[in-house]
Image: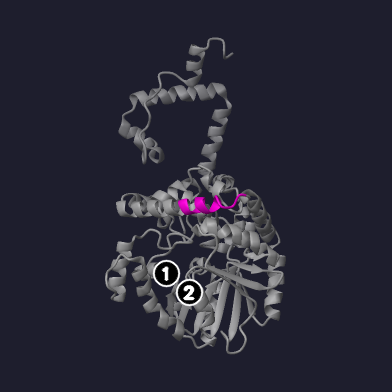
Amino acid sequence: MRGNALAAYRRRAARALADATLRGNLRRATDTALAKRAARLAEIPDYDDWREKVAAIRRAGWEDRAALVARASAHLAAAGARVHHAADAAAARRIVAEIAADAGARLVVKGKSMLTEEIELTPHLEALGLEVLETDLGEFIVQLRGEMPSHITAPALHLNRRQVSRLFADRLGAAETEDPEELTLAARRHLRDKFLAADVGISGGNFVVAETGTLVTLENEGNIGLSTTLPRVHVALTGIEKCLPRLADLDPVLRLLPPNGTGQQAVSYVSLLNGPAPPGCGPEALHVVFVDNGRSALAASGQREILACLRCGACLNVCPVFRNAGGHSYGAVYPGPMGILLAPYLLGDATAGLNPGNSLADVCSLCEACGEVCPAAIPLPDLILGARAEKERRAPASRRLAWRLFGRLAASPRLFRAAGAMMRMSLRVLPAFLLARLTPSWSRARALPAPPPRSFRAELRRRHPGRLS
């Protein structure tokens, strides 16, 4: 995301809103996700108490991240894992490429990992001549389509079964069917031999427990398990904010993440990896890469609380903007409310901190639904509002001057009333096409209202004489 992200968003969103199939897919998928979430949360009577526990755990995680990463790294190294630290995306890509080269790898299989999407790892490895295959079903689908994921937990959320069936027929030679089980089997037949032939398996890390040096992965399909056990080398990449202080902290986190993420009581597979596998029982080597890539800059900002994010995706499902325009409209790996806060720091020049041109804070409707559903109790609406204010503080001097002039105008009752009278007169006499040119941002998506016959102050004085001095 570079340049004026807001203008680019508007172009992509306009195309998405004109696509009736896409909008139908988005609405059905998010409606289903929200209904499943509500059903599961109804089974947790003390949900608010668990939510407070998760919030406290995650807050401790981002506040003490340096100490927790150091402690986790020490335990991992003591257990025989190779630990690496990447300051930015380029460093992370270089580390993984060197590991693959040392292993003489030609085929790499990947479990689902948004961090690897963030650092654009797959195209980098492919440019070096490696075959890289996504093995999560949703990621596999979007890889075949040449797209980025449209959702952080459901990468192919924007597609329906008919579209996937045609894709598999065209790319895999599979028989066309709308049966989800048959479609899954078609992907499985293609992927199974790849797991067995792969030299390197790459995964993310949902969490790392500092107390024990335990790498935690969560999944429903089993592809991460195959990617991390069958190849000779396992490489796990995780953000520096993913450390949990204690092993016991997994309990509240794993109680709330599945219901909010996928509407389940629990994920199908929870893997706790404590160092490399014993000889003959798994990969010969385990590499863990802790990635910063702008997270330290984010931790020093007013939006630091977003680092407590569990990556459940609930805020995307409930967001009216996401539900209508979809994830691809954001033009970034992280869409929706959480993406608005993460993308300016984690994408692009991650060492420079916030780039106002990359911020999509103005896209948010401030309906506050995202703050209500967040299982880590992150005040997303407040943070997005703060991001808007920060964007304005860093805006060009001409824009800041305009806001200062407006502030002085609004601070003077006499000047404000005079300006209001001039505006009402302008709305009456100026033609609509000229007003649209004078107010392009407003007129792009709406019509200017009919001018009122008098100001609110005048109307109040007319109805309640003596109310105003």
Question: How far across and down, in percent of the image, does residue 142 sit?
Answer: 39, 67
Position of 246 relative to 424 (above/below): below
Outermost residue, top side? 465
SS assignment at label 1 = helix
Along the line of sight, which residue is nearer the eye, 383 or 253? 253
Q: Residues within 10 Å of mark 2 (few under 14, many from 20)?
A: many
Image quadrant where residue 151 sits: bottom left
Please, which colouring scheme is shown?
one colour
- Which residue position is annotated with label 1? 137
Image quadrant where residue 74 sits: bottom right
Q: Are marks 1 and 2 in contact (CB under 8 Å)?
A: yes
Q: What label sits on residue 223 in the rendered view?
A: 2
Q: Which residues are magenta?
A: 35-45
Magenta span: chief secondary structure: helix
Q: Let me know if residue 44 is in the magenta part.
A: yes
Q: Residue visible at 45% across and 61% down?
A: 154
Q: Residues within 10 Å of mark 1 (few under 14, many from 20)?
A: many
Q: Residue visible at 69% across and 67% down?
A: 247
Disc 1 to disc 2, C-alpha distance: 9 Å
Image quadrant where residue 310 sits: bottom right
Q: Amino acid at mark 1?
A: Leu
Q: Is 164 placed left or right of 94 in the picture?
A: left
Position of 285 relative to 369 (above/below): below
Quadrant that contains the C terminus = top right
Along the line of sight, which residue is nearer the eye, 332 or 403? 332
Q: Is 430 placed left or right of 351 in the picture?
A: left
Q: Let me know if residue 3 is in the magenta part.
A: no
